[in-house]
């Protein structure tokens, strides 16, 4: 690079061109148009890792069908608190996406979001009993008031014919359905958000630029070192605020920052694979996201589902994901990623979490050892008449589950997202996985409130936040009337009704 070694000053550096950086960058430019923002992405395209359509489930995670968000307690009751929280968060995300349409930043919402019914499906007396209890608990909450439930095979056949045709008629089955479910192409949405931000002065995107170091400057700013992977050379950028939204690559960069808040965090990488249907006639026969129960010891990202997708206007059908293990933190990362993340301050949490999660390790080993015949056998639990020749294996995305310190157990493996922020709010990183992208907007709102405390209190920022998120400052979970108003408005704007 001609400016190798040259320093430049900016307000914000975003690391990683995925849904999180895209959401934060877009929102900050809306809140304060004169901010100078630089986004750096190590690959030559945007949204090519976790945000890419084929690297994630594309489910608009709203807890309609995901059974891992509604665990059954020892007394037999079903805890729906997490489901309510996730449904609330997704409604917030939809408000920002509706704002994109209302402002005509994006003309066609179907390029990134489409209506696809969400269905939970189980079989066996014990599971049917659980799903019935889950339905009874959820339908009392306004987020799930429209949920349907049945144990009638004839009705189930109309909901999901592929799942029911060829199934043992004696087998006890049940399902719940929400027609308001969605399929989201987070890769397309990411590109849309960044594309809009790029039209504004002071927002620049640099592809094939790898952030190699983050160091605190004497004046309190952050010095970010970036390598140009195409032209060679490197440069340094001084930023008042840094967001590390690099997916699985966030942990190593956070560790390089040296902030005390990063100590004790580790990562456990989990890879995934899909079976993708190549038969158009079969794809046409299924129109739903059908989620089942996860295997004992499996991570939440491995909950099996027979999944209608809409990618670039074309329908497809996937089943999986099948979990696997790789020491890479990114799909296009290094086999040394895991080992390089091990530090003196996180060895104990890593070891403690490893001991506590031996069943998960065994599960991942069994998944890795599966043959194509084994995978098709699992598919037949959800599609009894599935034929091997109609399905092809495709590698999905890489996820890094968070391992953090725990005073009682030494370390715990977390299945969720974690925002790690410096005490002064000058740097933040997002770690973890599901529900991730679906809750990107509320996560970024929380980050803005933490890291831009003075600005967010101003009348200008408050007014803009309420324009982008009309329910901002109010609880949709506690206000059924407001929730209905918001859902009706966003559904109309996003073409979901």
Image (tube, rainbow, N blue to C red):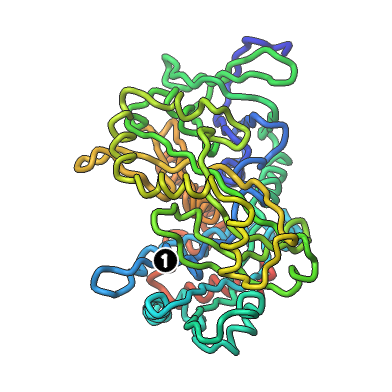
| Residue 42 found in image quarter | top right
Residue in the picture at 50% in, 67% down: 292
**Nearest to the observer: residue 202 or residue 51:** 51
377 lies above or below 422: below
172 lies above or below 12: below
| Residue 356 found in image quarter | top left
Horizontal side, residue 495 vs residue 223: left or right: right
Q: Residue 358's x, y, as percent?
A: 34, 45
Horizontal side, residue 390 vs residue 253: left or right: right
Residue in the picture at 59% in, 74% down: 180
What secondary structure is found at the residue carrying circle 1? helix
**Nearest to the observer: residue 188 or residue 493:** 188
Residue, disc 1? 83
Density class for disc 1 (Cα within 10 Å; few <14, some 14-19, many ≥20) is many
Q: Residue 278's x, y, as percent?
A: 77, 60
Q: Is residue 460 visible?
A: no
The residue positioned farthest toward the left in the image shown = 408
Q: Residue 82's x, y, as percent?
A: 38, 63
């Amino acid at each position: 690079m001609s400016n190798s070694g040259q320093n430049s000053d900016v307000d914000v550096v975003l690391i990683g061109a995925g849904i999180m950086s895209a959401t934060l960058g877009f929102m900050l430019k809306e809140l304060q148009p004169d901010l100078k923002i630089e986004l750096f992405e190590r690959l030559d395209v945007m949204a090519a890792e976790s945000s890419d359509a084929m690297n994630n489930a594309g489910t608009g995670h709203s807890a309609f069908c995901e059974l891992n968000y509604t665990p059954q307690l020892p007394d037999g009751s079903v805890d729906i608190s997490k489901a309510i929280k996730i449904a609330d968060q997704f409604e917030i995300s939809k408000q920002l996406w509706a704002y994109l349409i209302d402002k005509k930043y994006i003309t066609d919402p179907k390029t990134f979001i489409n209506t696809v019914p969400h269905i939970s499906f189980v079989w066996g007396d014990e599971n049917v009993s659980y799903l019935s209890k889950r339905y009874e608990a959820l339908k009392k909450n306004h987020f799930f008031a429209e949920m349907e439930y049945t144990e009638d095979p004839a009705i189930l056949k109309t909901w999901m014919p592929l799942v029911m045709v060829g199934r043992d008629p004696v087998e006890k089955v049940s399902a719940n359905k929400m027609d308001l479910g969605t399929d989201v192409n987070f890769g397309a949405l990411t590109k849309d958000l960044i594309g809009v931000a790029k039209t504004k002065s002071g927002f620049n995107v640099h592809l094939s630029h790898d952030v190699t170091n983050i160091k605190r400057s004497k004046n309190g700013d952050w010095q970010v070192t970036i390598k140009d992977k195409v032209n060679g050379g490197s440069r340094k950028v001084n930023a008042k605020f840094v967001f590390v939204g690099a997916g699985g690559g966030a942990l190593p960069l956070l560790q390089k920052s040296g902030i005390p808040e990063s100590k004790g965090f580790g990562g456990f990488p989990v890879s995934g694979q899909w079976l993708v249907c190549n038969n158009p006639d079969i794809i046409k026969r299924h129109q739903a996201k059908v989620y089942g129960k996860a295997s004992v010891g499996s991570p939440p990202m491995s909950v099996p589902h027979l999944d209608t997708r809409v990618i670039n206007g074309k329908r497809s059908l996937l089943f999986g994901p099948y979990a696997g293990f790789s020491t890479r933190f990114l799909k296009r990362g290094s086999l040394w990623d895991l080992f390089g993340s091990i530090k003196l301050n996180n060895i104990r949490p890593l070891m403690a979490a490893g001991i506590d999660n031996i069943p998960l390790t065994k599960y991942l080993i069994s998944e890795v050892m599966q043959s194509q015949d084994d995978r098709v056998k699992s598919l037949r639990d959800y599609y009894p008449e599935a034929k091997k020749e109609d399905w092809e294996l495709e590698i999905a995305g890489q996820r890094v589950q968070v391992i953090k310190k725990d005073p009682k157990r030494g370390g715990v493996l977390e299945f969720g997202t974690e925002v790690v922020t410096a005490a002064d709010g000058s740097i933040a990183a997002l770690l973890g996985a599901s529900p991730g992208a679906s809750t990107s907007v509320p996560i970024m709102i929380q980050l803005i409130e933490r890291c831009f405390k003075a600005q967010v209190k101003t009348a200008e920022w408050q007014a803009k936040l309420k324009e982008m998120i009309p329910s901002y400052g109010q609880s949709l979970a506690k206000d059924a009337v407001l929730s209905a108003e918001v859902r009706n408005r966003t559904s109309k704007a996003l073409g979901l009704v």
